[in-house]
Image (tube, helix red, strand yellow):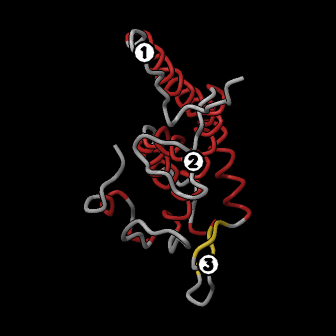
């Protein structure tokens, strides 16, 4: 389960200056790593959704929004808790340290992951990438099987059903 804002502060040392979740731009190292991790997870979920043949722009939980792949967002939600725990472990085990970040009040990017930190981060992400990708694909296949079962039980209907989150090809 993803962290709740009321409890998340107790997990991270005060040296990280993490008070709550913020984005665009992230203001502390925890938010930098969470944002990057969620972005990479989103990409893995997009790949899984495409590989099944679904249209990633038509979600079930996330409403359509320009440029957002809402169905991929839906599948990413299922793994956000795993990302939250993994990010906590990166900082708790000191895989990432304060030296891996630049912090400035004067920049349009108040906190950035430096080259040294990126090397450590991507090495650690490579270790969990296969599992995240496999889980995303498993979720997509499960959804596809449920939809197929749903269509099989509703075959008696005369009106053809279309599902907004499945890519539709023009009939020939």
- Do the residues under discs 3 and 1 have CB atoms within 8 angstroms? no
> How dense is the environment of label 3, judged by Cα within 10 Å: few (below 14), some, or many (20 and up)?
some
Q: Quadrant of residue 150?
A: top left
Q: Is residue 82 left or right of residue 37?
A: left
Which residue has dot 1 on it?
Answer: 158
Who's the residue at 43% across and 13% down the image? 149
Who's the residue at 27% across and 58% down the image? 7
Residue 67 location in percent, x, y?
A: 61, 56
Which residue has dot 3 on it?
Answer: 109
Q: Quadrant of residue 80?
A: top left
Q: Quadrant of residue 82?
A: top left
> How dense is the environment of label 1, judged by Cα within 10 Å: few (below 14), some, or many (20 and up)?
few
Residue 20 location in percent, x, y?
A: 37, 68
Closer to the N terminus: mark 3 or mark 1?
Answer: 3
In this rendering, the label closer to the viewer, 3 or 1: 1
> From what the image shows, is residue 27 above or below residue 55?
below
Which residue has dot 2 on it?
Answer: 69
Per the image, label 3 sits on a secondary structure element best described as loop
In this rendering, the label closer to the viewer, 1 or 2: 1
């Amino acid at each position: 389960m993803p962290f709740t804002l009321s409890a998340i502060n107790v997990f991270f040392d005060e040296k990280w200056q993490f008070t709550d979740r913020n984005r665009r731009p992230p203001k502390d190292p925890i938010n930098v790593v969470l944002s990057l991790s969620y972005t990479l997870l989103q990409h893995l979920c997009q790949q899984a959704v495409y590989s099944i043949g679904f249209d990633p722009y038509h979600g079930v939980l996330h409403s359509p929004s320009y440029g957002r792949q809402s169905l991929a967002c839906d599948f990413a939600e299922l793994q956000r808790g795993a990302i939250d725990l993994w990010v906590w472990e990166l900082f708790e085990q000191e895989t990432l340290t304060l030296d891996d970040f630049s912090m400035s009040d004067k920049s349009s990017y108040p906190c950035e992951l430096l080259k040294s930190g990126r090397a450590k981060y991507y090495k650690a992400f490579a270790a969990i990438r296969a599992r995240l990708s496999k889980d995303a694909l498993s979720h997509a296949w499960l959804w596809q099987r449920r939809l197929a079962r749903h269509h099989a039980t509703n075959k008696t209907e005369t009106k053809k059903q279309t599902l907004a989150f499945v890519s539709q090809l023009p009939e020939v």
